[in-house]
Amino acid sequence: MNKPLLRFLSGISESVLSALSILLFMGIWQVVAIEVNDAMLPTPIMVAQVFWQAILSGELPYHLGVTLLRLVVSFIIAMLLGCAIGILLGRSKPLDSLFDQWLIIFLNIPALVSMILCYVWFGLTESAAILAVVINKIPNVVVTVREGTRALDQDLLEMARCHHFSKRKTLKYVIWPQLHPYIMAATRSGLALIWKIILVVELLGRSNGMGYQLNLFFQLFDVASILAYTLAFIGVIQCMELLVLKPLDKKNQRWRR
Amino acid sequence: MTSIRIQINRKCYPAVGQAKPNLAIENLQLQVQAGEFVCLVGPSGCGKTTLLNIIADLDQDFDGEISLNSGQHRRPKIGYVFQNPRLLPWCTVRENIELALTEPQLNQQVDALIAAMQLTAMQQVYPERLSLGMSRRVAIIRAFAINPELLLMDEPFVSIDAPTARQVRNLLLQLWQQRPHSVLFVTHDLREAIALADRLVFLSASPMSVITEIKVPISRQERDNDVAIEAFRQRVLHDYPEIRSLV
């Protein structure tokens, strides 16, 4: 790229730039879709129309809501258990060597296998679906948080012991701020992973949710609806990033130079 | 005030990887009287920090006994100035100091200490923005602020510029005279040790043990007098040839 263009770009604010980039993407899509002229690749405007219809009919909000509820429940369970196990393994060498192999096994079990097993063993129920997601997510959290716990600064922990910090004070002021980047990493990768898994879980064994709907559209070859649902997805993810994760990051990183 | 009796038979660091086990301390006996200011002088790497960690109860893996006697039925309050400042980077200067306080009423004297260390303008700053010398001063305030009965200081004035170091030294002495407490001060600067201590303890290279102990006869009024300190330093080096390699 030439220098004046770069200088021009760096002069524009970040939010304007990302809006421009999305517009550019839409533009390319529109042009390609018009060129191809096939029902299998609808234009963004057609997708937007379908999206709007699905919202008005209440179908999209219902299925999205069901999926989001499953996501929140399984995410919370997986994060809490994963953090607890991760901190435990990171703090204790014997426990770590005892369970390291388990962790590697669970980390590498294909998501589909654990889903099928959960449905076979526990029936096509809501709890089996959530369990399948949680089993897939926990090893990820454990690995990340364990790494963070191993990297805890011994000097600071000694300082806290020396000044008789209570357990709560040590956790809040010494351990948590150090684990924070790791937990944020586990949160981001976890949300992405759960999104992907939860749809398959719904597709296989639930009669509502985004995965169920997508399967329906697949059978009807309704690409516009598939893209409209994907759009809703991306919207939700962006909201989480902008409204929850980014502000959290900003608050917890303000001390950095 | 706290008196300390130290008897360490053996302190050994286990072998890690290719490194052999390291015998850090062997047969070390040392006593500190209540209210006494003792400087530990020894070559770097000889195990002085290990000794302070053992006294502060951060290291319990040793063969021997440490008895701290404060005349009361509880462990004396120990202020520890570590070799590196060990400030919490996500807490401001003020928060770092206040977190260490055990009783809220101590808060009042924090202002005075911060002012004496010339850090009033930096109270709301995060440690990453401080120079190393400033961070050290914050760590010193943190240790002073709890009104310790025993103060452990591990080369606290390294990398503080000479005029500030002198000022902080004077402040330390002033506080020590106002509120008597025992001090164990590690340094390898003999002049600094003479300016501060009631008694100098010279320690051997690893495995560490006591080579000799020397009382400093200079009166407290004369400690600011560089000539007197230098004269005593020359005398010590002349009278005790075995310590020349240590300082």
Image (tube, rainbow, N blue to C red):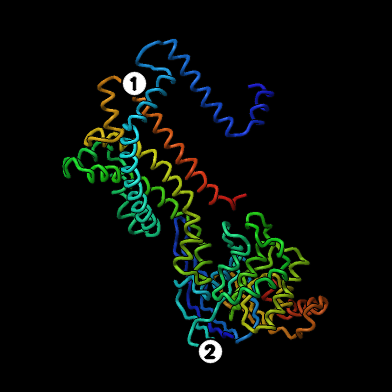
Q: Chain of mark 2?
A: B
Tell me, for residue B87, which label it has, or none.
none
Q: Which is more toward the observer, B213 or A121?
A: A121
Does residue B152 appear left or right of residue A222 in this picture? right
Q: Which residue is mark 1?
A: A223
The secondary element bearing badge 2 is classed as loop
Q: Residue at x 69, y 67 (%)?
A: B157
Residue B171 occupies quadrant: bottom right
Q: Which is more toward the observer, B116 or A38?
A: A38
- Find the residue positioned furthest to the bottom: B71
Q: Is residue A146 visible?
A: yes
Q: Residue at x 28, y 24 (%)?
A: A217
Does residue A233 appear left or right of residue B162 in this picture? left
Residue B199 occupies quadrant: bottom right
Q: Which residue is mark 2?
A: B71
User: Which image quarter is the C terminus of chain B in?
Assistant: bottom right
- Circles 1 and 2, Cβ within 8 Å, touching? The answer is no
The amino acid type found where label 1 is placed reads: Val
Q: Residue A200, how many percent across, how many down?
A: 28, 34
Give the alpha-carbon distance from disc 1 to disc 2, as whole Å.
Answer: 83 Å
Q: Which is more toward the observer, B81 or B228?
A: B81
The amino acid type found where label 2 is placed reads: Gly
Q: Is residue B246 visible?
A: no
Q: Chain of mark 1?
A: A
The secondary element bearing badge 1 is classed as helix
* Callout 2 crowding tier (Cα within 10 Å): few <14, some 14–19, many ≥20: few
User: Which image quarter is the N terminus of chain B in?
Assistant: bottom right
